[in-house]
Image (tube, rainbow, N blue to C red):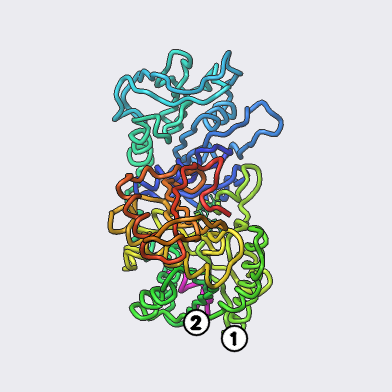
Amino acid sequence: MILIIDFGSQYNQLIARRVRECHVYCQIEPPGIHADQVRALAPEGIILSGGPASIYEKTSPRMDPAILDLGIPVLGICYGMQFMIHALGGSVKRADKREYGFASLTVRRRSGLFANVDKHTDVWMSHGDAITALPKGFTITASTANTPMAAVANTRKKLFGLQFHPEVHHTPQGKRMIRSFLFDICGCKPSWTMKSFARTAVQQIRDEVGDRKVILGLSGGVDSSVTAVLLHRAIGRQLTCIFVDNGLLRLNEARQLRERLSRHLDIRIRFVRAQGRFLKALKGVVNPEKKRKIIGRVFMEVFEAEAAKIKGAEFLAQGTLYPDVIESVSAFGGPTSVIKSHHNVGGLPRKMKLKLIEPLKYLFKDEVRQLGKTLGLADELVWRQPFPGPGLAIRIIGEITPKRLAVLRKVDDLLLEEIRSAGYYKRLWQSFAVLLPLKSVGVMGDRRTYENIVAIRAVTSKDAMTADWARLPHKFLAALSNRIINEISGVNRVVYDISSKPPSTIEWE
Ligand code: XMP
């Protein structure tokens, strides 16, 4: 295990990604962690992340310097290195000018972190401070034109520092440096796989739950489905899932989920048909935030009422992922399990007095997909594009009526069929249709039509924080538009959304 101390860098998750890609488990902790806690965790190595602060600022994050004396190898990156050098008696000063971007690194000795790195290689710099004097026992191991102490090391104590960022793609040989740290310096074994994770997680869940009961809110998405399968493997029929049909789902969605999870995997699922309640509460509502609030509230009510019927349940499971947890860990405080406000079941446990179980909370999305595959989940579920909790409600601009839902469902189904058969489904982050609150004139046969307009949205993205509209081929779009207008009555015009996020968002509401 590798411990990453979070000094607030925007690249923290990337460091964790790189370590995990090497099949080594890692955990991110705030700098407030004590040396005793670190000793108890017994990591093979410690990585001190970068951070926006300058160590001379009063409020800059500090770490217990005793952690540097535990005999555990340490790799300090940017601020992490400056902190280490300062704490050990070296000095750090404001550099004459801030350095940001590519720099050419010259390696002095191709050993340690640089054992498998070329003598000259590009690295990515982003810093205002620089080291000016080294503590005893340290030597310079690589330099750039502007930064003579670009890499330093105390090989005897296994303390290493890099002024640049090895974790970003702009440092092409950065991964080799991280690999050398993990395998040669720390002696880690590449044994972290989803198979080993599943084995450990199953045991932990069994130990924690014993013979008690667990409830899980199932949305049909990847995270909650994988959580369900993992829990089912651990505790079988002690798990009850609740799936709320809010009437805002895609065509046949509830049926497909039932087939994939309850028939094939024998998972106990209670399907709650609450379409009427949701549609009644949404009647006449056009404001997007109001729609979201109403859907959230009704969901809670329905879920709580159903959960109350499950006698003796003591746990509530959630498919929270690591990025949600990391985002809620501040560099200066401790981890707090705040769940993002748009997460649909956030807030339930407090009211329901159930203990939370979050078995995926140390995993990234691609690891969850991998885990799903390892657990034998159907490909259609593992590779599902994200679908928002409020469902089609936020893809119908204006009022939601059964009639408009029926039109959008048909368009959505046809669109996905086309996207899948053309082989775009996995490559797109999301692809969907939006029903606009406008009508336009058309001509079909010899008759005038006055019908709905549908917008197609297809985006590429890595994490939904930013997204770009997909450059789908004109030929594909032409065929899609043709099919929609010809086959779905009530639509006579299709437009393609060419906006990126930011400044637009992925969903229209
Ligand atoms: P936006 O539209 O903000 O969406 O660019 C970013 C990602 O979040 C999804 N999304 C939601 N997911 N409940 C969810 O579970 C919600 O209320 C919600 N709203 C947006 C959206 O589909 C995209 O992937």
Image quarter of residue 106? top left
Asked whether mark 2 and ligand 1 are closer than 8 Å, the reply comes as no
Residue at 60% x, 49% y: name it.
329
Mark 2 residue element: strand
Q: Is residue 392 above or below residue 440?
A: below
Nearer the observer, 234 or 100: 100
Tell which of 425 and 357 is nearer to you. Answer: 425
At 65% from the left edge and 71% from the top edge, which residue is drawn? 283
Which portion, as a residue range, is magenta? 203-215
Q: Mark 1 Cα within 10 Å, few/some/many (few <14, many 20+)?
A: few
Residue at the image position 41 percent from the left and 77 percent from the top: 255
Residue placed under numbered mark 1 in the picture:
309
Do we see residue 44 in this rendering? no
Quarter of the image containing the C terminus?
bottom right
Q: Give the x, y percent position of residue 455.
A: 47, 53
Q: Residue furthest front?
A: 446
Question: Residue 378 location, x and y as percent?
Answer: 32, 68
Instruction: Say if 42 sits above or below 400 in the image.
Output: above
Q: Position of residue 246 (x, y in %)?
A: 55, 73
State the image coordinates of residue 272 (x, y, percent, origin top left): 53, 80
Q: Looking at the image, is mark 1 or mark 2 earlier in the sequence?
A: 2
Mark 2 sits on what residue?
270
Instruction: Name the mark on residue 30.
Output: none
Q: Is residue 207 magenta?
A: yes
The reply, left or right, for residue 198 in relation to residue 90 is left
Does residue 160 appear in this view? yes
Give the structural element (helix, strand or loop) at label 1. loop
Q: Indicate the amino acid at tag 1.
A: Lys
Give whichever of 49, 487 is nearer the camera.
Answer: 487
Query: Where is 314 relative to 22, above or below?
Result: below
Whether residues under marks 1 and 2 lie with C-beta atoms below 8 angstroms apart, the answer is yes
